Amino acid sequence: QVSLVESGGGLVQAGGSLRLSCAVAGLLSSNYPMGWFRQAPGAEREFVAAASWNSGATRYADPVKGRFTISRDNAKNTVYLQMNSLKPEDTAVYYCAARSRFQVMSIMTSDYAFWGQGTQVTVSS
């Protein structure tokens, strides 16, 4: 059974940093494109970052470019999202997701097959 479990969320002041972790079980995450998405209250779930399964390529949403970094630790079957220079508008529930094995990475929520339960990030001004 596949599970993705996010952790590392919390309350932080504007300008601060957090590192989110996504522990993956039931599949070898190194064979899967991985993504991070977020959903603010009353808003649609939106793309944040994605990582290719094989090329090391990454992609970021414009609002987080230069501030967020997605990375993998294949030995731990874990994906991370390092978030720096946080802003109040980054406040949301953050979700980790895995696309199907060996697919290209995607920014579309509908392309991802497996999802975590989410972790809350709140940035105070």
Image (cartoon, rainbow, N blue to C red):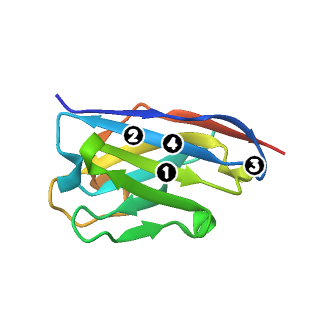
* Numbered badge on residue 22: 2
Q: CA distance from mark 1 to mark 3?
A: 17 Å
Residue 49 point in image, percent of width and height: 45, 60
Residue type, numbered disc 1:
Leu
* Numbered badge on residue 88: 3
What element does badge 2 sit on?
Answer: strand
For image coordinates 40% across by 44% down, the residue present is 96
Residue type, numbered disc 3:
Pro
With respect to residue 68, does 9 lie above or below?
above
Nearest to the eye among marks 3 and 2: give it: 2
First of labels 4, 3 by sequence position: 4
Q: Are marks 2 and 1 in contact (CB under 8 Å)?
A: yes
Q: Which residue is mark 4?
A: 20
What element does badge 3 sit on?
Answer: helix
What element does badge 1 sit on?
Answer: strand
Q: CA distance from mark 4 to mark 2?
A: 7 Å
* Numbered badge on residue 81: 1
Residue type, numbered disc 2:
Cys
Q: Nearer the viewer, residue 29 or 112?
A: 29
Q: Is residue 111 visible?
A: yes
Q: CA distance from mark 2 to mark 1?
A: 8 Å
| Mark 4 nearby-residue class (10 Å; few <14, some 14–19, many ≥20) | many
Residue 117: name its quadrant. top left
